[in-house]
Amino acid sequence: MRFSRLFAPTLKESPADAEIPSHKLLIRAGFIRKKASGLYDILPLGVRVLLKIERIIREEMNKAGAQEVILPIMHPAELWIESGRWDAYGKEMIKFEDRHGRNYALGPTAEEMITDLVRKEVKSYKDLPLNLYQIGRKFRDEIRPRFGLMRAREFIMKDAYSFHASDEDAEREYWNMYETYSRIFSRMGLQFKAVEADTGEIGGSFSHEFMVIADTGEGKLVFCEKCGYAASTEKAEAVKPQIPENRESLFREIEKVSTPNVRRIEEVSEFLNVPQDSILKLLVYIVDGKPVAVAIRGDKDVEETKLKNVFKAKEIRLATDEEIEKFTGQPKGFLSPINLSIPVYADYSVIPMVNFVAGAGEKDYHLKNVNWERDFKVEAFVDVAEVKGGEPCPKCGNPLTEKRGIEVGHIFKLGTKYSEAMNATFVDENGEEKPIVMGCYGIGVTRVMAAAVEQNYDENGIVWTPEIAPFEIIVIPVNVKNDEIRETAEKIYEELKSKGLDVLIDDRNARPGFKFKDADLIGIPIQVIVGKKISEGKVEVKVRKTGEKIEVPVEEAIERAL
Ligand code: ATP
Ligand code: MG
Ligand code: MG
Ligand code: MG
């Protein structure tokens, strides 16, 4: 590729709204352009990096036995209604109607779509196991799109889904994917950790997040350098029961407010126009047969797995309306805090003591002006503190290290959540009909590109790892008007190309300093600089990462580049 023809508009300054290095640099170096909030144009350099990332993913997924498919991005509403997520997924899902008035969503994830495909084709245990993946656009109307490709509203994801005749087989595939993900991120040259994680919106029985270590990461993780234990701090729960003194309830100004079917704290906050910090979610769960009201803080719904850990329970499920009525002495919509003894887990330091909103995550089930300890008769609460660096590892006791990270991949063992809801069954060896056991596995392809930059840059620009660099080598003739320099550079360029390397030649008629700046900014790993020393048959080879420069004969430069 010739730089003179390359559509790579570089900039001296980064845009005012870019806060983190990857966002700034990907724009400045001409990889991406912002179209609107959370929407980006990806320019040729960016596409080159993405294709390399995708190639590594495809190779490793195929090697692991998965098969690629392409499913529509337009998801018929019926499938999401069947799984119960049409409403539950919330405002992050973009919905629209076709000309006949039928409802659709732009897929944020594809469990429903794939389960629908598989349920129609798979009949017997002989058709299983199956692991199907796609690499394509996903749409999430993030409440706060930010950091460029890191948290976009339209992005590229590799999503895989596996189907099994037994739980054991699903578990085997889970670890197969765990290994595959580790290979994928290692091949990309990224520093990462697989951490035990929360299962979030998707649900399921257990999961790991793959985190690229970076100070700008939105996630936090702790890990043990001795035994290898690693967890996201959200998941690493230290359960500390506490018994505060009982107080008379002073129930006064609590107001019941009408809300739409909001499930997330962000949504309640938006709707009632109150800060997120002033919202507390109240849910009644049945834990080993006993009702427990749980108040949670945070932007996710209470996870059954998480609660299981907190209560060390075997069985846990949301209470039915009747159970709630019996337990609280109030109809479900009036989950009155006064009568509740609430085991709470949360970081209490962030809950204001006065006038917050308590809600049950359902339509019209919110209470305003609820006051901590005035309206709550707290008998005990379970305080799940974040595990911090320095605290003992739960496995071996060695002090934990704390770092920030970027979630680039996430694997889940789903179990039969979707297959039961959508009636995806198979007939087993004994002729018995059973729900298919599932797993799902995502990688944020565009986010990986940003995360890679977050981990590899310096004051001069991006420093790509060779595996995902847009070009492996750039040949820079310092002066294209000098025939010997130009011709030698062209010769090196052709030779490297003929050896199958991805080469860029900066054939622009520009000052050397200008070319060097662009080469550094774009971050191509190896620079072959053809300058005056060519009269002695020598060129300079510069390693972008270390800045190390060596003068070598032309032939050796070609050899070294290989
Ligand atoms: P996050 O916690 O960052 O919101 P998530 O847990 O909602 O991500 P998953 O549902 O696990 O995301 O999706 C699989 C992968 O897709 C994530 O691990 C991440 O790499 C990527 N991803 C998710 N949301 C976005 C987004 N808005 N922009 C870019 N990539 C994303
Ligand atoms: Mg998310
Ligand atoms: Mg997440
Ligand atoms: Mg996730």
Image (cartoon, rainbow, N blue to C red):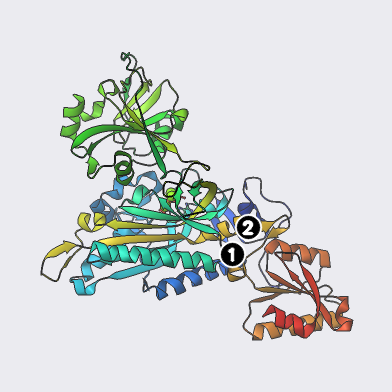
- Decide if residue 9 is in sight here: no
- Which dot marks residue 289? none
Left or right of 221 in this view: 242: left
Give the residue displayed 58% in from the left and 70% down from the top: 467
Callout 2: SS: helix
Tell me the quarter of the image containing the C terminus.
Answer: bottom right
Seen in the picture, residue 270 relative to 23 is either above or below; the reply is above
- Which dot marks residue 26? 2
Mark 1 and ligand 1: say if the CB distance to the nearest ligand atom is below 8 Å. no
Q: Residues within 10 Å of mark 2 (few under 14, many from 20)?
A: many
Q: Nearer the viewer, residue 50 or 453?
A: 453
Q: Are marks 2 and 1 in contact (CB under 8 Å)?
A: yes
Which residue carries the number 1 mark?
46
Q: Nearer the viewer, residue 211 or 152?
A: 211
Q: Residues within 10 Å of mark 1 (few under 14, many from 20)?
A: many
- Decide if residue 557 is in sight here: yes
Farthest residue to the front: give it. 397
Left or right of 378 in this view: 16: right
Amino acid type of the residue that numbered disc 2 sits on in the rendered structure:
Leu
Tell me the quarter of the image containing the N terminus.
Answer: bottom right
Amino acid type of the residue that numbered disc 1 sits on in the rendered structure:
Gly
Seen in the picture, residue 154 relative to 473 is either above or below; the reply is above
Image quadrant assignment for residue 309: top left
Spot occupied by residue 180 in the image (x, y as percentages of width and height): 43, 67
Spot occupied by residue 292 in the image (x, y as percentages of width and height): 25, 33
Give the residue displayed 20% in from the left and 40% down from the top: 288
Q: Label 2, label 1: how many angstroms apart (C-alpha)? A: 8 Å
Spot occupied by residue 346 in the image (x, y as percentages of width and height): 40, 34
